[in-house]
Image (spheres, grey):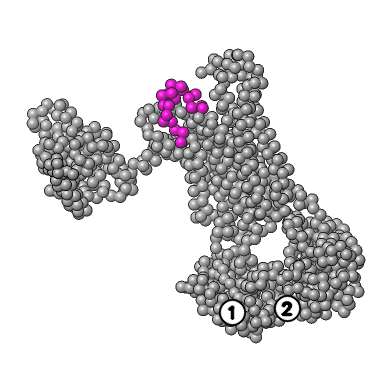
Amino acid sequence: MTPKSDLPQGTLDLLIMKIVALGQVHGYAIAQRLQQVSRDVVQTPQGSLYPALHRLENRGFLDAVWKETESGREAKFYRLTKKGRTQLETETASWNRLAEAVSLILSLSEGAAK
Amino acid sequence: MTWWQRLLRRSELEGRLDQELRFHIEEHTANLIAEGVEPTEARRRARLSVGGPEQVKESCRDVRGTRWIEDLWTDLRYALRTIRQRPGFAAVVALTMALGIGSTTLIFTLLNGVLFKPFPYHNPNRLLALQEKTVQATQFGNLWAFSYPNYLDLHAATRSLDAAAFRYTGGTLSQPGDAEYIASCEVSAELLPLLGISPPLGRTFTTQEDQPAAAPVALISDALWKRKFGGNPEALGGTLAFSGQQYAVIGVLPAGFQIADDTVDVVTLIGQDTQPVMKARDAHPRIAVWARLHDGTTLDQARTELTVIGSRLAAAYPRSNEGRTFIADPLRPYIGDVGSTIWLLFGAVTLLLLIGCVNIASLLVARASSRSHEMAVRVALGAGRGRLIRQCLTESVVLGLIGGFLGTALMFLALKPFVALWPGTLPRAEEVQADWRVFAFAAAVSLLSGLLFGAIPALRAPTRDLERTLRGGARALVGGSHRLQSILVASELALAVVLLVSAGLLGSTVLRLSSLDPGVNILNVLVTRLALSPSVVANPAAIRIGWQDILDRTRALPGVQSVAMVDTVPMREGNNQIGYWPSSALPPRNEMPLLLASSVSPDYLKVMGIALRAGRFFDANDRLDSQRVAVIDEVLARRAFGDSPALGKQLWIPDMGAEPVEVIGVVPHVRYWGYAEDDAQVRAQLYYPFAQVPDRLLRRWSELMSIAVRTENAPLGIVEPLRRAIRVSARDQVLTEIRTMDQLAESTLARHRFLLVLFGAFAGTALLLGCIGIYGVIAFLSRQRVREFGVRIALGADPRDILRLVLRQSVGMIAAGVVLGSVLAYATELLLVRSVAGLQPHDPLPFLAMLALLIGAALAASLAPARKASRTSPINALRQD
């Protein structure tokens, strides 16, 4: 499934892992937090959240437990695994490097890019 | 969770997925309602935010990584449904495959058992066979069996391997029970432990017993133990009177015990053999040496050490060991020409299987044409090309596997009878059993065949011209499938040509060989080995008297016309080839031409029906103390003396003594090696009187002797009277290897006939399949063109024009098949010439005859649908569709 948002490839996984790293959450909460954290700028691409969650779970970056929410309903809560935490760190680092490089290029004045 | 866990817990995962998504939507809806959105609208927006539930679920399933197997399951179910819908078609395919795969697996089982499996000994890949090797090669090559002193020295010196020796002997078992001649073997004490064999009852030999002075001991086979001792454990400590000596039985060998491929009943110690040849370093009394590499030693290290030992012995014993060393090779079963027979059959059944696959492929192509509409609809509904191909392949692989399953079952039924039908005895027959390799082979062949016959039609799964297909109904793909089907039929015919030509060549070879004159009159002659009583064999005078007594008693039997002794019976075995020279100026030994020497008694020509061309044959006056004489065949006369008359000339034969022999008679050539072998290489022959065999050789010669008896009626009828007659003079004189000359003559062609029958059957099947193929394609194409024919006839075309039109297509296919097939058949012929003795290369007659047969049959097969097409009624044709 091709991402239908403006999010760069792979970013959704990174954001999801970051949110899950903050504490056990269920899918709906992740969707809400994604919106809140990014102040409604990042719209979760339609239909891509759950495939992404399942992919991360299958790769062993997340694991999941079923338990009750505060409202007493059963929901699937995701947690970051050890492997996931390492992955999050590497990806964050490489994202930062990329972002720095991109902003460095963008901040060059026109004549200097030679 | 690993992927197979995810696969096994699929329904649980589905439920959980559903629950998770429902939770999301309901939470979202509740929140929206709490924000004041109207419930229906809230539900709609919540659904939208997740995405289409089914799509999301599909994407989640995709990331599980179990998709392919779920697809496979779907395809399998679809395939089984399709097969059930057309059971007739499926049955044809499965049966064709069952026959093809069954016969291929059958021959593979032989390959596996006879050629691939190692010897059934402990850790067989560390076992080696050792031989003596000389720098100078003679006419017999440069590899030799060991002399016993050389073996003993090597055994004592080597550090890289454990060596053991054995030699086949055979002898008369006089006690207990009735006397009989049995196969036996002398082994060194190390041999059985080396092979990992220990007697289940009693003990094995000790090295102290492996000495000339030790008390004689023997191990006996399980079969002999049961036959002679009734399977009683008290046999241990009992005695055997064997070959004139008393042996104490110390153990019973495991059931099925064999050395190499030979079953032996008595095993004795080679060190207890006191014959003079065992002490001579320059004698090579057929001693085989096997060895086991020490752990951590490589074959190359062992070879180096053997070379060193060899050169040390050469320095110490230059007279016998000059230029002589020892070599080692991995121990392999000796199977003679059986290997090439099995490979030929394997080639033939593989061709047959290929033809079967091609046949089914063309059936599937024809069916695919009628299913093209269905396929187009699937493509239009979004099925990918890869997915469609996979689906088609699944179907054919399922058919292939069903065929493979049936075929393996057939193989199990056919294996025993097939081995029993093998000409002569199949070496290592007891190893020919289905094992994991056989099952793996059957599975692989089934899978491959399924893929092969499925791939051709599957790759045609439509992608192009989708619209045209959908609009045009069933007729749209005819152009493409026509070409493909023609190619398939042509290749089927080409493969059939290969089998037909092979069968034709074999047939003409068998015809030619069996019409040859063997040189002897094979009717009404009994030949049998005869072992004199062990009590007389030590005394030369007693041996001569013993044989004369046997000849006299046999001649006196009713129904016997004449009787003679002979050591090398024509077409049986025996290969006493020795060098000769027509003058006393002898060349070096390895440059001397060879002749086959046979010692016979005076009536030999009469018994065998051999004519006398010149001079005389032997009589009672040719004795040990008279002039040494010989009778030669025309081949030797020509080779030794050219055109000048041979009578009265002399031949120097070092192996028969320093003095020359005088030629007193000339006889025609006899095909000693059988029809085929003697055709490939004509060998010169010489006869000399048994009476002139010197005393020192007499015991050995006596062991080799057979008697040949010409009878008035069926020769096997005198076996019992003969047996009784020779027992009168000594109770333990026995007959072995009782044959008639026509059995022996027939056996030299048995392999040829066996190959001919099988190749004939395969070729017939191939021809039938090819004809069915061409019939099917022509009928199919004619049906497709029925409207065209209708129009042509309506416009005034003659039925004969239509006939010609249809036949032109079949002639094209046949021509292509014949051309391609001839090239392949020519290559096959070269292969056959190498592995079938007496098969003459470039024999055009069988080749052309088989091509004509194929062309005729294929034309006949296409004539029926062509006729039908030519009788097309224009009205009906135009009304169709």
Tell me what residue is drawn at x 79 percent, y 71 percent: B581
Q: Which residue is mark 1?
A: B311
The image's mark for residue B244 is: 2
Q: Nearer the viewer, residue B673 or B825?
A: B825
Horizontal arrangement in the rendering, residue B419 relative to residue B526 (left or right): left
Disc 1 + disc 2, Cβ < 8 Å:
no
Q: Nearer the viewer, residue A66 or B44?
A: B44
User: Residue B843: where, in percent of width, then height?
Assistant: 72, 46
Q: Residue B725 appears in which quarter of the rendering?
A: bottom right
Q: Residue furthest bottom?
A: B213
Residue B146 within the segment the image draws in magenta: no
Query: In this rendering, is residue A24 above or below B574?
Result: above
Establish whether labels 1 and 2 are both on one chain.
yes
Residue B550 appearing in the image: no
Q: Quick one: label 1 or label 2, which is nearer the N terminus?
A: 2
Tell me what residue is drawn at x 58 percent, y 55 percent: B111
User: Residue B794: where, in percent of width, then height?
Assistant: 60, 14
Tell me what residue is drawn at x 79 percent, y 68 percent: B597
User: Residue B403: where, in percent of width, then height?
Assistant: 52, 42
Tell me what residue is drawn at x 63 percent, y 31 percent: B811
Q: Which SS class for mark 2? A: loop
Which stretch appears magenta? Answer: B459-479
Residue B862 appearing in the image: yes
**C-alpha span from label 1 to label 2:** 39 Å
User: Residue B348: where, in percent of width, then height?
Assistant: 61, 47
Query: In this rendering, is residue B382 above or below A84?
Result: above
In which chain is the residue bearing label 1? B
Query: In this rendering, is residue B245 above or below B227?
Result: below
The amino acid type, in three-letter code, at marker 2 is Gly
